[in-house]
Image (cartoon, grey):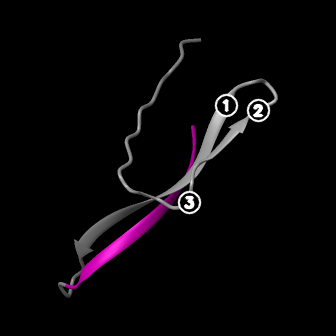
Amino acid sequence: MKAIRNKVQLIGNLGVQPELKTLESGKTVVNFSMATNEKFRNQEGVLITDTQWHSIVA
């Protein structure tokens, strides 16, 4: 089976300090939350900011 690799780039703000963990297998991972914002105007012309939170494990 051929491996498939996806790449995602998020630009935002950290929610908390990244947490570094070493797994039983010896691999190291980092966990953190990130907020991304999208700004748009609604039908009445009011500027709306929509914030989405992402849980990241890398």
Q: Earlier in the sequence, mark 1 or mark 2?
A: 2
Q: Is residue 24 above or below residue 43?
A: above
Q: Amino acid at mark 3?
A: Val
Q: Earlier in the sequence, mark 3 or mark 2?
A: 3
Question: Which circle marks residue 28 in the picture?
Answer: 1
Residue 27's x, y, as percent? 70, 26
Range covered by the magenta-colored residues? 46-58
Question: Which circle marks residue 16 in the picture?
Answer: 3
The residue located at (31%, 65%) in the rendering is 38
Q: Quadrant of the N terminus?
A: top right
Q: Are marks 1 and 3 in contact (CB under 8 Å)?
A: no
Residue 22: name its quadrant.
top right
Q: Is residue 47 above or below residue 4?
A: below
Q: Residues within 10 Å of mark 1 (few under 14, many from 20)?
A: few
Q: Earlier in the sequence, mark 1 or mark 3?
A: 3
Please identify the dominant SS of the magenta region.
Answer: strand
Residue 28's x, y, as percent? 67, 31
Q: State the SS at label 3.
A: loop
The residue located at (47%, 24%) in the rendering is 5
Q: Residues within 10 Å of mark 3 (few under 14, many from 20)?
A: few
Q: Amino acid at mark 2?
A: Leu
Left or right: where does residue 10 sit relative to residue 16?
left
Mark 2 highlights which residue? 23
Q: Quadrant of the C terminus?
A: top right
Q: Nearer the viewer, residue 35 or 47?
A: 35
Question: Which circle marks residue 57 in the picture?
Answer: none
Q: State the SS at label 1.
A: strand
Q: Nearer the viewer, residue 18 or 58?
A: 18
Q: Residues within 10 Å of mark 2 (few under 14, many from 20)?
A: few
Q: Is residue 22 shown in magenta?
A: no
Q: Are marks 1 and 2 in contact (CB under 8 Å)?
A: yes
Left or right: where does residue 52 sit relative to residue 31?
left
